[in-house]
Image: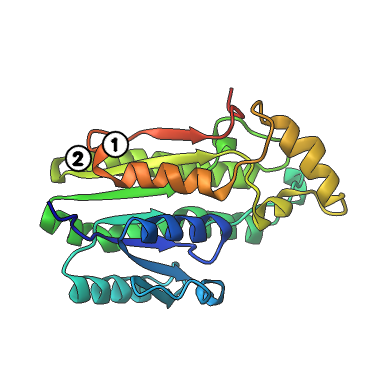
């Protein structure tokens, strides 16, 4: 029996996790569409099933146009992975500006509303689809000084659960992944201003993971592949912790 080629869209595709997710999906023979402000880091992949778009996920018209083009080209969109996100340097609340708060909420939450709103009509038409949101274990196991980031990831999880119940009647599954501290460039951005990044990585982040190492982007990509697949056909509204026990 021939395997049906599926079409997956990944936001934040130029980052460490996004790129690993792309590679996993390509390895499974899927058509993958990667979106990011810059997709230069994806040039080395040069795969016939990879299509990339430079796009700001906060520009609703642009996202709707890209998704329509993808659907018109392939006649289907099977999955959406919202891997886009930004970090917050550990900062006491009285030093956090409204601009920083708003930026975290826009990129980490508003973007989910825009991409989900844009993709749902295509999934409803086929009565099938899977949406995965990459949030953060900090939403349930906070660290001091990350209040705005934590709030944004808590909102991301709640939005995902809300969409899961709203879209269940259309056989569209919506799930969240909470990564623990991951070995990506983004990790250094959580370090307080002036602190030693490498020392903080070892003394704070690695030590916080009971299994004893940082999460590899491939750990997240494997979990995403499961949630996008038919093996998870009865999984929706779930939050999967891929955190090495950090949330315990």
- The answer to whether one can see residue 114 in this image is no
Q: Circle 2 sits on which residue?
A: 168
Q: Of residues 158 and 13, which is closer to you in this image?
A: 13
How far across and how far down the image is residue 193, in percent? 83, 54
Quadrant placement of the C terminus: top right
Q: Nearer the viewer, mark 1 or mark 2?
A: 1
Q: Of residues 141 and 207, which is closer to you in this image?
A: 207
Separation of marks 1 and 2 at Cα, in angstroms: 8 Å
- Image vertical order of residue 10 relative to residue 70, above or below: above
Q: Of residues 234 and 190, which is closer to you in this image?
A: 234
**Whether label 1 touches label 2, CB < 8 Å:** yes
Left/right placement of residue 27 relative to residue 30 reads right
- Image vertical order of residue 173 relative to residue 47, above or below: above
Q: Quadrant of residue 246?
A: top right
Q: How is the image coloured?
A: rainbow
Toward the front, the furthest residue is 1
How far across and how far down the image is residue 173, in percent? 26, 43
Mark 1 vs 2, N-terminal side? 2
How far across and how far down the image is residue 93, in percent? 72, 44
How far across and how far down the image is residue 78, in percent? 24, 57
How many other residues sit within 10 Å of disc 1, few (<14), some (14-19) or many (≥20)? many
Q: Of residues 29 and 167, which is closer to you in this image?
A: 29
> Which residue is at 67% across, 31% downward?
209
Q: Circle 1 sits on which residue?
A: 236
- Label 2, secondary structure: give it: helix
- The answer to whether one can see residue 120 in this image is yes
> Which residue is at 64% across, 61% downward?
99
How many other residues sit within 10 Å of disc 2, few (<14), some (14-19) or many (≥20)? some
What's the mark number on residue 87? none
Q: Quadrant of residue 210?
A: top right
- Label 1, secondary structure: give it: loop
């Amino acid at each position: 029996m021939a395997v049906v080629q599926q079409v997956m869209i990944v936001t934040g595709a130029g980052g460490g996790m996004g790129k690993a997710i792309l590679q996993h999906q390509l390895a499974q023979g899927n058509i993958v569409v990667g979106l990011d402000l810059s997709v230069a880091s994806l040039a080395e992949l040069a795969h016939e099933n990879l299509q990339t778009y430079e796009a700001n996920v906060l520009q609703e018209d642009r996202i709707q146009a890209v998704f329509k083009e993808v659907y018109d080209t392939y006649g289907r969109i099977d999955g959406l992975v919202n891997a886009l996100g930004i970090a917050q340097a550990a900062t006491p609340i009285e030093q956090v500006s409204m601009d920083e708060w708003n930026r975290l909420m826009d990129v980490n939450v508003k973007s989910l509303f825009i991409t989900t709103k844009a993709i749902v009509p295509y999934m409803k038409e086929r009565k099938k689809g899977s949406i995965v949101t990459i949030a953060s274990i900090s939403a349930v196991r906070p660290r001091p000084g990350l209040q705005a980031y934590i709030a944004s990831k808590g909102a991301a999880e709640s939005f995902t659960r809300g969409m899961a119940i709203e879209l269940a009647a259309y056989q569209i599954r919506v799930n969240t992944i909470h990564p623990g501290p991951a070995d990506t460039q983004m990790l250094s951005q959580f370090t307080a201003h002036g602190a030693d990044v490498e020392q903080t990585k070892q003394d704070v982040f690695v030590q916080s993971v009971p299994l004893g190492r940082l999460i590899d982007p491939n750990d997240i990509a494997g979990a995403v592949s499961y949630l996008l697949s038919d093996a998870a056909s009865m999984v929706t509204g779930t939050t999967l912790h891929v955190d090495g026990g950090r949330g315990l």
